[in-house]
Amino acid sequence: MSEKVLMKGAEAIAESAIRAGCMAFFGYPITPQNETPEYFSRRMPQVGRVFLQAESEVAAINMVYGAACTGTRVITTSSSPGISLMQEGFSYIANSNVPCVVVNVMRGGPGLGDIAPAQADYNQATKGGGHGDYHSIVIAPHTVQEAADLMFKAFGLADKYRIMVVMLMDGLMGQMMEPVEFREWVDVKNNKIPVWATAGQGKRARRNIITSLEILAEGLEKMDIALQEKYTEIKSSEVCCEEYMMDDAEYAITAFGTVARISKTVVDLARERGIKAGLIRPVTVWPFPEMVFKKRAEQVRFFFDVEMNEGQMLLDVRLSVNGKKPVYYYGRLGGIVPSAEEMLDELEKLVGGKK
Amino acid sequence: MEELRKFNIDGLAVKEFLIFGGRIGSGKTEIAVNLAIKIKQRKINSILFDMDIVKPYVRIRDIKKQINSYNLSIVSPPDITRTLDLPIYPPYIIGSLMEEGAVKILDIGGDPYGAGSIAQFRNIIESRSYNFYFVINTKRPETSTGDEIIASLKAVEHASRLKVTHFILNTNLRWETTGKIVREGYDILKEVSVKMDIPIAFGCVDKAHKAVFDGVSVPVLPLELFVKPLPELNKNSNGKSSF
């Protein structure tokens, strides 16, 4: 690990991506994640790698697609409206089975919205967003250190499954500064071109072709089924979830990202008041940690889902709990971050009413 | 234990403009707000200017509620621009900058971008008296070595067209700050200070952890921290996730 430094989340993900062997960044600026491209713009030339500001998000994601086809570790970062513009590219990347990492530092929406932190792109990230039967792996860090650590994991998963990995952050995660240490650099000197990549025919008898096109329905169905098989494998081996104070919990708060971070404080405050609360924090929001919820449904009296959106993860929680226990929701919209105190108030109301 | 060297607020308020610049995230806003409070408490006529048009969050206009009780005179962009991405100054700012008899504390945006935005007011600033404080946290990217500090100093001076007059040592790793970290930061900045002939005006520290400045021979301004977007995690809950 490196010596500790003080970084914004938006800077830490850039440094970590570079250390993880990311060779190219393509993107277009948007608040509140401009520190990320700015950091890349300074650091990538220093280490002999590519930084390119495209003319739009549409151009940027297609550049990512192109670089990904050569088996190069590549990244783009943006915020909600910019991510919306990239959806077509995401869908092509999915059906082309190429690896890349995309960071969405979410802000208030819909539409132009505002530049405050939000979590309202959960559905877009986990349920597709672009067209077709596809998924991306979606990971949601809750501290700057975790974001830095998960960036290595993101590139690893992208390469392993030839899939797009989305890091779902929000404006606050991007802007807040915390101490962070980085893993050792990935040695890129001996990078090998993967056999599937379109980076020159080499000694192969035939050239590789990467495409998301299949004109015949029977052929396309085969491609779709192959994708679903890949997703099934990911669901069975790559679920990640943190449980905090859940061993003896009677009430399970559940949240991801920034809200999960605040929820840990809420758990501590609730316990000081004699309420046995715990936290279930999905780290991968796709694949969703269904089994954790299923198991805890036997133990807790209810689940309390808190999000900075209108209750998007709520549906995944309800599906996982499958009616065994009540699932309540509290959320703030438009870019407002709920405070620990207001969350605790809501929890106390629910506990008071259900004891 | 050596007593912390006393911080002399009256010595600061002799200049009409007190400008706080530096790298993004170096701690300018906290320091500017704390100084404004101290100056106000000395009953010195003063105005605090929120001139950060670089950062989208955690600017003075975002912590107005927290500092409301100090009754500071604050000039900042209209509230409506708080969650818009509009890098503009309000028209009334020039009138306030020209107001005579008040100490004007300027919290400017980070990096050359932020510093460049005040170059347009250079004539006003230079025609009066000013101190330009360059805030350094050696634990932040781009100011961790002497060479990096000099490069960012020059970039900020070039953009603002103003000369930096003092350094402020704000080396910290938030709650993980130790005496060793502060001393290392001091050693780096001291060398630059001698080389560039720019004095270190003072050091800053979270007032809850003053002891980390023991043995560092600069006056110390203990900070009341206002910019706290999220509660700190307790040690047990910083659990790492594993796949």
Image: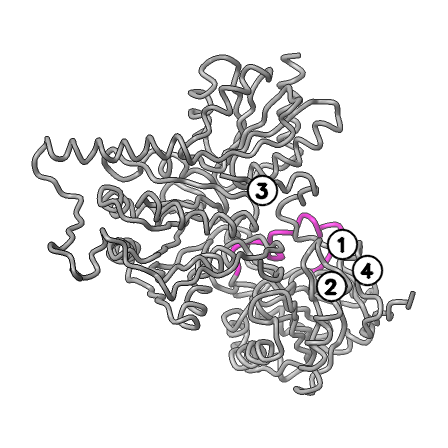
Indicate the colouring scheme: one colour
Residue at the image point whose x is 61% and y is 54% from the top: A178
Q: Which residue is mark 4?
A: B210
- Asked whether the beta carbons under mark 2 and mark 1 sit within 8 Å of each other, the answer is yes
Real-space Cα separation, disc 4 to disc 3, in angstroms: 30 Å
| Mark 3 residue crowding within 10 angstroms, few (<14) / some (14–19) / many (20+) | few
Q: Secondary structure at mark 3?
A: loop
Determine the CA span between mark 4 and mark 2.
20 Å
Query: Which residue has dot 2 on it?
Result: B36
Return the x and y of residue A206 as percentages of the image width and height: 11, 54
Give the answer, above or below, for where B56 lies relative to B3.
above
Quarter residue A343 falls in: top right
Chain-order first, disc 4 or disc 3: 4
Q: Nearer the viewer, mark 2 or mark 3?
A: 3
Q: Quadrant of residue A128?
A: top left
User: Given this view, does label 1 or label 4 mark the residue nearer the observer?
Assistant: 4
- Provide the secondary structure element on which disc 1 rests: helix
The answer to which of marks 3 and 1 sits earlier in the sequence is 1
Q: Residue furthest left?
A: A216
Q: Position of residue A294 (x, y in %)?
A: 49, 19
* Eye-nearest disc, 4 or 2: 4
Apparent side of residue A29 relative to residue A301 in the rendered image (left or right): left
Element marked by disc 4: helix
Q: Amino acid at mark 2?
A: Ala
Please indicate whether residue A278 sits to the left or right of residue A159 in the image. right
What residue is shown at x 70% (from left), y 72% (from top)?
Answer: B168
Q: Quadrant of the C terminus of chain A?
A: top right
Report the disc number at residue B70. Answer: 1
